[in-house]
Amino acid sequence: MEPLFTSVSNNAHHLYTLLSCIGFAPKATVQITPSGLRFSVEEGRVIQGLAFLDKSLFNSYTFNQQSDMSNHESNGQDDSSDEASYPHFVVSLSALLDTLRIFGINDPNEPNGIRDTNLPQTNPASSAFSAPSLLMDRSCTLQYAQHGSPLSITISEFGVKTTCELVTYEPEDETDIPLQRDAIIMKIIMRSAWLHNAIAELDSSTPTVLKLSACATREPYFALSGAGGPFSESTVEFSADQHNEIVGDVNRAQSQTNKILADDGSSRARATRAKLAPTVTETFLVSPPSSMGDRIRQNYRFALIRKAARAMNVANKVSIRGDRQGVLSLQFMIELDDHNSVGRPVGAGLKAPSGPVCFVDFRFVPLLDEEDAELDVPITDE
């Protein structure tokens, strides 16, 4: 019988890079879909990491959906939703990463946390023992024969095959941390390096709480603070270049309606100030509900935010989103390098990313007021 799922990749480092971003939990729930593999990890129902390995990451990707559907029917299951019928199972994520690490896929300077990510990162394709020419004959095959079967990982290198089989488990009933996409009150897109540097700076004071503040009309427009630790509270503010922003807003104001054009100078000044945004952001949309006033304030456990350090370090951009319930989403865009090809020229000698673009999403549940109070209790020696 044909295996339910088989995929082959000639660049397993891509798989390792994405999965290591959510490697903060020992186990992951895997779902096989026609468009790719979905890995989900969570901890205490307060943090969730999602990584999607798109089928484009693989040289070949075969999902025998018809065979899977017939297997469900033979078990007496009749799911109305196609997504519910896709096979899913739990696997040891730490064992999967260790397997790739043993096979020599990993980055030898993999960061383990915020404080370690400032170390110089070594490209595994640049060392003497893993030159691009040595990686050309290496392939990684993932296979899942049928429901209940182990997840098989086979590395083929110069005609030598090494296979590792990971035991799979039945998943528990679990749901994703809900992000209300129709109730988004904050969306900020910026380079991931800016966020990484800010969190690393705050982490030096060992805080227990991350305080997020965002406002579209007055300073600070976007600020992150670390509090609750043994040291004083520290804050990183993302400021606006007021001169450039006001000039741009005045130019845009000339194309407004006659009523706006008729406003006096003070009204125009207030309008331009209201449109200011931090210079480092590409998108800055903040629209809190009336119950919050003009500023969004939410608190999160710093230790949980720290678990996204790996993704912050390897990503190019991050989309910071928040909904009315306070759920925070950090969606990272990761441009993977393709060591087997060269990026195409893009003006001024720059090169476009030659590899695929993938996304890793983290979701965080906010702290409640009573939890804030417990974390803010000063530490005393008894």
Image: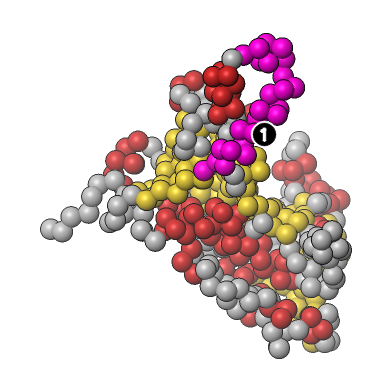
At 60% from the left and 54% from the top, the residue drawn is: 192
At 42% from the left and 55% from the top, the residue drawn is: 202
At 37% from the left and 51% from the top, the residue drawn is: 234
- The N terminus appears in which quarter of the rendering? bottom right
Left or right of residue 143: residue 213: left
Between residue 142 and residue 274, name the one nearer to us. Answer: 274
Locate residue 18: give its quadrant.
bottom right
Left or right of residue 67: residue 210: left
* Residue 40 at x, y percent in the picture: 62, 53
Residue behind mark 1: 248
* Residue 173 at x, y percent in the picture: 57, 46
Using the image, determine if residue 45 lies above or below residue 185: below
Disc 1, SS: helix
Magenta part, dominant SS: helix
Residue lying furthest left in this view?
382
In the image, is residue 259 part of the stretch drawn in magenta?
A: yes
Using the image, determine if residue 262 lies above or below residue 372: above
* Residue 59 at x, y percent in the picture: 86, 66
Between residue 225 and residue 242, name the one nearer to us. Answer: 242
Dot 1 surroundings within 10 Å: few (below 14), some, or many (20 or more)?
A: some
Amino acid at pointer 1 = Gly
Locate residue 260: give its quadrant.
top right
* Residue 371 at x, y percent in the picture: 34, 41
Residue 103 appears in the figure:
no
The region drawn magenta spans 239-263
At 85% from the left and 71% from the top, the residue drawn is: 341
Residue lying furthest front in this view?
265
In the image, is residue 17 part of the stretch drawn in magenta?
A: no
